[in-house]
Amino acid sequence: MRATILGCVAGLLLWSTACAQQVEFPLDYYSFEEIAQRMSVGGRRVDCARELRQRLAIIHIKPRSWQQVREILESALDIRLRRISESEDRWMLERNPEVARQERRWRERLAAFLEKQCDRDIRLLRQMLDKNTPVDELVRTLMEEHAQGDIQEDLPREALEKYIRQVIQAFREMPVDLALREWRAFKRLERELSEW
């Protein structure tokens, strides 16, 4: 009898411990600090990394075990919960380092691409302003860039060539050089271009 009672008490304790460690996220916006607070159950303490404190996520997770919720959050939000202290059962909610590295690589590639585009645009602008650069040569260059997909215009070839010649002529007739040095002249040029 005594063993049965002890078994029931132990079962109730295990059941209540398992229930106490369940975590849920009713559908709502949660800051990552709030996520860390909700994950701080069952004696665990979860801190939020500084770089995530100003971020939000929309989450809806029905009651599940802490480990299941951890796996869902890590997978869905590209984060990780890393244990930082065994004795105090402390955890850190932080960005997944592999995802952070990949994003950094993407940003570097985007920056390099934009820098290359900017250099190309400045080079073309200088050629358009330079009256010593033959118009036919400049038109040929711009048509080649269009063929490579660098210039987006949905015009037939002859119309595009005519359009490019008009733009070059406008750049050479309008005070673009002055506008690049003086703000008022730039505003005047902008007005003239919109009227043109």
Image (cartoon, rainbow, N blue to C red):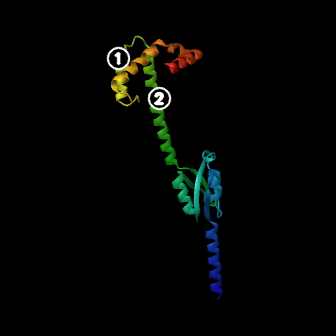
Residue 139 is situated, as x and y percent measured from the top left of the image, at 36, 19
Please name the residue shown 34% across and 25% down the image: 157
Residue sticking out furthest to the top: 132
Quarter of the image that includes the N terminus: bottom right
Is 141 left or right of 62, judged from the image as shown? Answer: left
Q: Are marks 1 and 2 in contact (CB under 8 Å)?
A: no
Residue 20 in which image quadrant: bottom right
Where residue 96 appears, x then y in whole percent? 53, 50
SS type, badge 2: helix
Of the residues shown, which amino acid type is indicated by label 2?
Answer: Glu
Please tell me how crowded label 1 is: few (under 14), some (14-19), or many (20+) other residues with Cα within 10 Å: few
Name the residue at 55% across, 56% down. Answer: 73
> At 63% from the left edge and 81% from the top edge, which residue is drawn?
8
Can I make out residue 127 in this image? no
Number of the label disc, if any, that sits on residue 75: none
Q: Up-down: is 30 above or below 185? A: below
Q: Front-most of 159 and 143?
A: 159
Residue lying at the far front of the rendered structure: 195
Q: Which residue is mark 1?
A: 137
* Secondary element at image label 1: helix
- Residue beneath label 2, please? 115
Between circles 1 and 2, the one closer to the viewer is: 1
Q: Where in the figure is residue 131, as x and y percent of width and height? A: 42, 11
Q: Name the amino acid type tagged 1.
A: Glu
Q: Is residue 136 visible?
A: yes
Q: CA distance from mark 1 to mark 2?
A: 24 Å
Residue 132 pos. (x, y %) = 40, 10
